[in-house]
Image (tube, grey):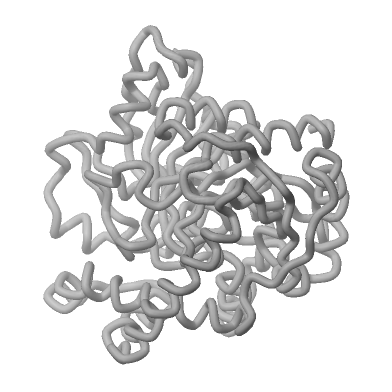
Amino acid sequence: MPEILTDTVGAFIPGPRVEIAGSPTGPLADLSFAVKDLYDVAGQPTTYGNPDWALTHPVAAATAPVVTALLQAGAHLRGKTKTVELAYGLTGENIWHGTPTNPAAPDRFPGGSSCGSAAAVAAGLVDFALGSDTGGSVRIPASYCGTFGIRPSWGAISLAGACGLGPSFDTPGWFAASAAVLARVGEVLLPEDAPGTIGPLLRPEQAWANAEPATAAALAPAFTALEGLLGRARRIEVAPAGLGALYEHFRCVQAEEAWATLGSWVAATKPEFGPGVKERFEAARAMDPAKASAGRAFRRAFQAELRALLAGGAVLAYPTSPAPAPKRDSSQAEQNAVRERTMGVTAIAGLGGLPEVTIPAGRAEGAPVGFSLVAAPGRDRALLALAARLTEALGR
């Protein structure tokens, strides 16, 4: 088994670490991994980032199939990682378990909700780590911590044995320190791709305009290198109504689903929540059904347009996040502003049910920023292969 490293960044949940040896042979036999603490591991509590959740739920009777698949492929489990409470936040803050340090920018948040998984990979504590992504919970921490990350096509991998938030958006995802390891995990977990080529390249102008100038400048070389692989990009608009409309429709549908999924427990238990999480659940409880219905109608039309655009193998490329991670001393109002601006971009793949891979392709303001590749549903493996080619072209 690989050596167990000391958790210097607070990535793992408090208490003794759960460790399980993987199969002695298999495609991942030389790798170690961690799992976000919303996946069940038999005999262990699943705290979902909140002490009241842990107190009101029994230890897991079975291990989530996605975790079992990794163990059977030979990977060694090194522990469960911290999450934002009930996975409902993008900064990575958790007042109960402690907010992990961002190894790439210690004065900034690590991103959430898969904060511990991103920090564990960025600190070199494990080779890869399992997270989950509803509104950006893998993509944003990967961007903030300078790791590779993937949100697969919605529905490509089972979420049995995992706590839910917004079921029509929720998907497993994972972080890795290299494009090669990211792809190796994909070979175990992902179904085979639909046949077809990858390309041409499309540049969504709103996503680039939404980015801070320093972020766009830091990622320009990656875009140029990608044009070298796929040919000159065609400039397009993916959201004629604006990214703000994408965020609003996503927010309303997600909130309705979050309350439908977790509201009964929240109402019965009256748990204590940290900053921001309480307010989001209060907003979810009060969500106007008409707004959520309008959001679902918008999503159906948006999905149809995106899937037609990408059906021939086209790839979208744009900044994963508009800016580096917020500073840890940012006010709640500043964090909310970043959240809205960020989720207008993450909602492209979220509403579309699309696979998105983010690679650490630059730094702005002294901190990492990620570069995203997005393709049609079912092109996950091709997207991972393209990420590996791009990383090689960038000399990383």
Question: Can residue 110 be seen from the camera position used here?
Answer: no
Q: Nearer the viewer, residue 325 or 26?
A: 26
- Where in the figure is residue 342, as x and y percent of width and height? 61, 70
Towards the viewer: 289 or 40: 289
Number of numbered discs? 0
Residue at left 56%, top 71%?
A: 343
Compared with residue 142, is residue 41 higher up or lower down, i.e. above or below? above
Residue 16: x and y, percent?
A: 32, 35
Q: Residue at x 68, y 46 (%)?
A: 146
Q: In the rendered view, does 315 fall on the left or right side of 231?
A: left
Q: Decide which of 75, 233 is in the foreground and name it.
A: 233
335 vs 230: above or below: below
**In this rendering, would 368 be left or right of 289?**
right
**Residue 20 x %, y %:** 32, 23
Residue 363 showing in the rendered view: yes
Left-right relation of 171 to 135: left
Looking at the image, which is closer to me, 204 or 50?
204
Q: Residue at x 39, y 39 (%)?
A: 35
Q: Position of residue 362 (x, y in %)?
A: 80, 50
The N terminus - image quarter: top left
**Which residue is rendered at x = 42% and y = 60% of the image?**
134
* Residue 168 against residue 131 in the figure, above or below: below
Picture quarter with the C terminus: top right
Q: Which residue sits furthest top?
A: 25
